[in-house]
Amino acid sequence: MRKWRVAGINFDHMHMGDNLRMAFEHPNVEIVGVCDDTPGRMKDVLRNFNIPPELAFTDYRACLEQTKPDLVLLCPATAKHGEWVEKVAPYGVHAIVEKPFAASLAEADAMIAAMKKSGKQLAINWPLRWFPPYTTVRRLLDEGTIGECVEFHHYGGNRGPLWHAADKVVVTAEDVAAQKPNSWFYKKSEGGGSLLDYMGYGATMGTWFQNGRAPIEVTTVVDEPKGLEVDEHSVTVVRYAHGLSKMETRWGTFTDPWILQPQPRCGFVVVGTEGTVSAYDYDKTVRVQTRQRPEGFEMPVDSLQFPGQNPVQYVLDCIEKGKPIEGPLSPELSRVGQQIVDSAVLSAKEKRTVKLVG
C-alpha cells in the first residue's frame, strides 16, 4: 500500500494532538510537516511523534510547498475554518477539519465550494462518530431493530474547553483561570461558546440517525454568564414534520465524561418506531427496548475495526478506494447540522422560534 503524506496545520484546537496521534499510529502514514504561527504550541507533538524540528513551520505556504502532503489536518478556531480551508485548497490537498463545521452556514458553503474547486475531498471530523456506543446506535437503526428514528435527545459537554489539553491531559484550575481571558473559546468573534462548540455534535449525529432529514423550526435558549461574551449552556428544541427532538450543550458539567460521567449523563437517547436505545459517551453497553422486549436489555457496544476506527483511517480509505465521504463527516450531512446551529444562534439572539435557515 502507498505511504500517505499528512501534515497538521493550525493548532488553535487541542484536538490537533489527538488527530496527529491517529496519523502517527496509522501503518501507512508519514507525518511530513506541522505548522502553527506560535511555535510553542507544536513542541508537544514534535516530542510525542518524533517529528524533526526542520519539519515544523510557522508559514503554512512553506509547509505545503516543501512537504507536499496528500492530506492536511486543520484545527483552527471555529470562526476561522473557512479562512483556513480556502488557504490550503489551492494546494490540491484533501482536508479533515476538526469539528464544528464552521461558525456560520455561509462559511460552511464557502468551504464546500473551495474544496469542490480543488477536486479533493473535504471531511468534517466529529469525534463522537468514532465512539462505539453511537456506531452501535446507527447499526441498530440500519438493521431495523428499533425501526426508524423519530426522536433524539442529546446532552453534550464537559467541565469546559480549558480543563484539558491534547490526549485529555488534565489542566489545573490555576491554568484555566490564567488562560480564560485570552482564549478564543471565550471570544464571540472567534466562534466561542458552548453552543458553537457542542451543538454541532447533537445536530449532526441526530441528522445521521434521522437519515438526513432536516427540521422545520428551531427554538433555543442560552444562559448569559456574567463577565463573559459567550454562552456556557444552551437548550434547543427542534421541530420536525414527524415530531420534536432536543439538544443541550454545557460547559461546566460536574465532571468530565471521559473520567466520570456527570449527571445529566453525556450522550444520546434515540426513539424509533419499533424501540428505543440509550447510549452514553465511553460506555461499554447500550440499553435497548424493543416491542418483543419492552422491559429493555443491555447490549455490548460494537468493536470498531481498521480502517473505521478514526477519521484519519476512514478518510484515507475513502481516498484510496475512490469513495465519497459519508455520514457525519460528509459536507452534505454536516451542512444540515450547520443549518440547525445557525438557526439556534438566530433563535437565541432574537429570543424566539425561527424557521430553519438556509
Image: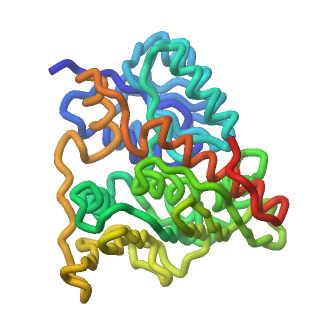
Is residue 307 visible from the viewing direction of this image? yes
Is residue 40 visible from the viewing direction of this image? no
> Residue drawn at (21%, 58%), measured in percent from left and top?
143
- Horizontal side of 69 relative to 11 (left or right) equals left
**Frontmost residue, 68 versus 314:** 314
> Residue drawn at (43%, 61%), measured in percent from left and top?
169
In which quadrant is the C terminus drawn? Answer: top right
Above or below residue 232? Residue 36 is above
In which quadrant is the N terminus drawn? Answer: top left
Above or below residue 337? Residue 249 is below
Q: Position of residue 136 (x, y in %)?
A: 26, 61
Tell which residue pokes out farthest to the bottom in this image. Answer: 295
Tell which residue pokes out farthest to the front in this image. Answer: 241
Q: Position of residue 247 (x, y in %)?
A: 56, 67
Above or below residue 219? Residue 71 is above
Q: Position of residue 155 (x, y in %)?
A: 51, 71
Where residue 226 sits, quadrant-wise, is bottom right
- Horizontal side of 231 relative to 101 (left or right) equals right
> Residue drawn at (27%, 79%), measured in percent from left and top?
289
**Frontmost residue, 22 versus 313:** 313
Q: Position of residue 315 (x, y in %)?
A: 33, 33
Figure disc tally: 0
> Residue drawn at (56%, 71%), measured in percent from left and top?
159
Where residue 246 sits, quadrant-wise, is bottom right
**Frontmost residue, 173 versus 257:** 257
